[in-house]
Structures are given as structure tokens and as C-alpha cells.
Amino acid sequence: MIRITIACVGKLKEKYLRDAEAEFTKRLGAYCQLETRCINEEKMPDNASPAEENQILARETERVLKLIPEHSYVVLLDLKGKEISSPELAGKLGQWMVEGVSHLTFVIGGPFGYTDDLRKRADFRWKFSPLTFTHQMIRILLLEQIYRGVKILRKEKYHH
């Protein structure tokens, strides 16, 4: 059974998001060992200078990097990454497993992004969508897409 870690910035504050996360975590339990690791967001002053912003992002990025388990294949959600469809994600999940990947880590940055150190650590950079989502909402959408990808890969019905 593949292990999947979601490494992310920020807590899910709204109950409906926590409920959605719990539901997809339960569904994915039949297919993988899932763990979510979070750090608190760094506080960004309203009138931060570019140098202050870079320092804050560097601190947050450093903390995110510590969430990534050693020897994990890292998929970074990145606006500069490659867009893929749900069937393509299913294909990638299958490909990674065939290649012997036993632990996947999906990384979601915070609302202000991250430094290039995180991009350098990534094995695959995925542009989730040209649309903009909150980092909390993207966490739920990511779980849904992993679940959908597993269902496609296993040729199981998604809707019952």
C-alpha cells in the first residue's frame, strides 16, 4: 500500500473543509496510508518590504521542507508546473508505483507562495489549475483528485 503525505501550510479553519477532509481521508484509507502534516502560516506584515517578504517566505519554506519525509517522491503544487487532467494524474500515480515509488508527498504552499528551494526539492511540479484557489480549498480539491485518480487507475466507478 502506497504512503501519501500531504505537506501544507495552515490549518483548515472552517468546519465544512474539515468535514470534507475527513470524508476523503476515510475514502482514501482503502487505497493508501494517508497522513497530513501542517505548519502554521508565517505572519506577513501589510507593508512588508521585498526583503522582509523574502525572509518570511524563506522561513516558511524551510519549515515546509522539514515536513517532507526522507526518500519521498515530491509533487509540488506550483503555478509554474505542468497542467494535467484527472486521467493523466491516474496514469502518473500508476507510473510512480510501477517505478517503485512507495511514498508520495504532495506539497501545498501558503498564501504567499514559497522560495525556489521548494521547487528544487520537487520531483514533479503540478499546476493544479489556471484558476486561483485558497490554499485551504486546494487541500480538499487535491484529496478529491487523488481519490479520483485512484478510482480511475483501478477502473472503479467514482459515482454510485
Image: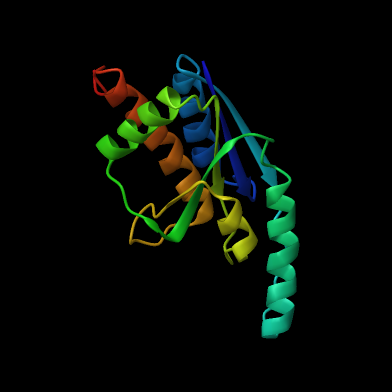
Image quarter hosting the C terminus: top left
Above or below 112: residue 81: above
Residue 69 as seen in the image, left or right of residue 31: right
Above or below 79: residue 32: above
Q: How is the image coloured?
A: rainbow
Does residue 48 appear anywhere in the picture? no
Residue 127 screen position, x and y as percent: 39, 55
Does residue 111 appear anywhere in the picture? yes
Res. 18 image quadrant: top right
Most foreground residue, 37 or 68:
68
User: What residue is drawn where x is 41% and y is 42%?
Assistant: 141
User: What residue is drawn where x is 37% and y is 30%?
Assistant: 95
Residue 115 screen position, x and y as percent: 62, 65
User: What residue is drawn where x is 46% and y is 49%?
Assistant: 138
Residue 94 as seen in the image, left or right of residue 118: left
Residue 5 screen position, x and y as percent: 59, 33
Above or below 129: residue 88: above
Number of callouts? 0
Residue 98 as seen in the image, left or right of residue 118: left
Most foreground residue, 5 or 9:
5
Residue 1 as seen in the image, left or right of residue 90: right
Residue 132 screen position, x and y as percent: 40, 62
State the residue lying farthest toward the front: 99
Res. 69 image quadrant: top right
Above or below 117: residue 155: above
